[in-house]
Amino acid sequence: FVWRIMQTDPNWGNFLYDVGTGTTYLIDFGAVREFDKSFVDGYLRIVWAAANQDEDTLLAQSHTMGFLTGNEEDVMIRAHTLSGFTVGEPFSMDRHDTYDFAKSSITKRISDHGAAFLQHRLTPPPEEVYTLHRKLAGAYNLCIKLGAKIHCRDLLEDVLKQHTFEDGLDHPLYNT
């Protein structure tokens, strides 16, 4: 969100961990992708809505960004909403404590909605989402494998505090 650039290949071989300093280095830049400011603004709004289980904003922003057409059946709307809420779970309002990825079963719960997407999706999601979600899935799986416990909500709030939206809508942290 900060630089609008992401290394989108979640392969562990793309990183080098220095045990002495505790630093992780990216060593393969082959799958680096830049994201448009408008996409980042919209997607960050979706993440915030998902984290706060704000169904109205999640669906409105999903429609604006092209995830949904507005003509979906209820089963697709429900799967989209629940999948979004599941992805946003580590960042939820009541999570100022650590999120335990290993105990979460988050990837299974996300994949539970896959059948509805395959059967009822009326439009493909924005192109940028394919690489972004691949990286997100890889990051979640890495956190699960490492048994990571992370203060995700605090990280998201820090990103939001520093983010300047240029989409003409109120900043989600400061709207009334």
Image: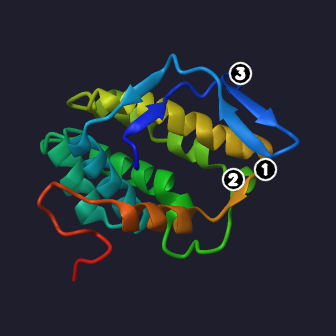
Which label was assigned to residue 23? none
Q: Determine the CA span between mark 3 and mark 1.
A: 19 Å
Q: Quadrant of residue 95?
A: bottom right
Mark 1 and 2 residues: CB-CB less than 8 Å, in contact? yes
Residue at the far right: name it.
20
Give the image location of residue 130, x and y in percent.
Answer: 39, 27
Q: Looking at the image, which is closer to me, 140 or 4? A: 4
Q: Which residue is mark 1?
A: 147
The amino acid sitting under disc 1 is Gly
Residue type, label 3: Gly
Distance between mark 1 and mark 2 Cα atoms: 6 Å
Identity of the residue drawn at 32% across and 35% down: 35
Query: Closest to the observer: 102 or 158?
Result: 158
Instruction: Indicate left or right for 135 with 129 as reference.
Output: right
Percent coordinates x, y for residue 138 in the rendering: 60, 34
Q: Residue at x 41, y 35 (%)?
A: 5
Q: x and y percent of residue 56 in the render?
A: 23, 64
Question: For the residues marked 3 and 2, what is the alpha-carbon distance in whole angstroms?
Answer: 21 Å
| Residue at image mark 3 | 13
Residue 87 to residue 69: above or below: below
**Vertical relation: 128 (above or below) 95:** above
Write down the residue under mark 2: 101
Disc 2 crowd rating (10 Å Cα; few below 14, some 14-19, many 20+) is many
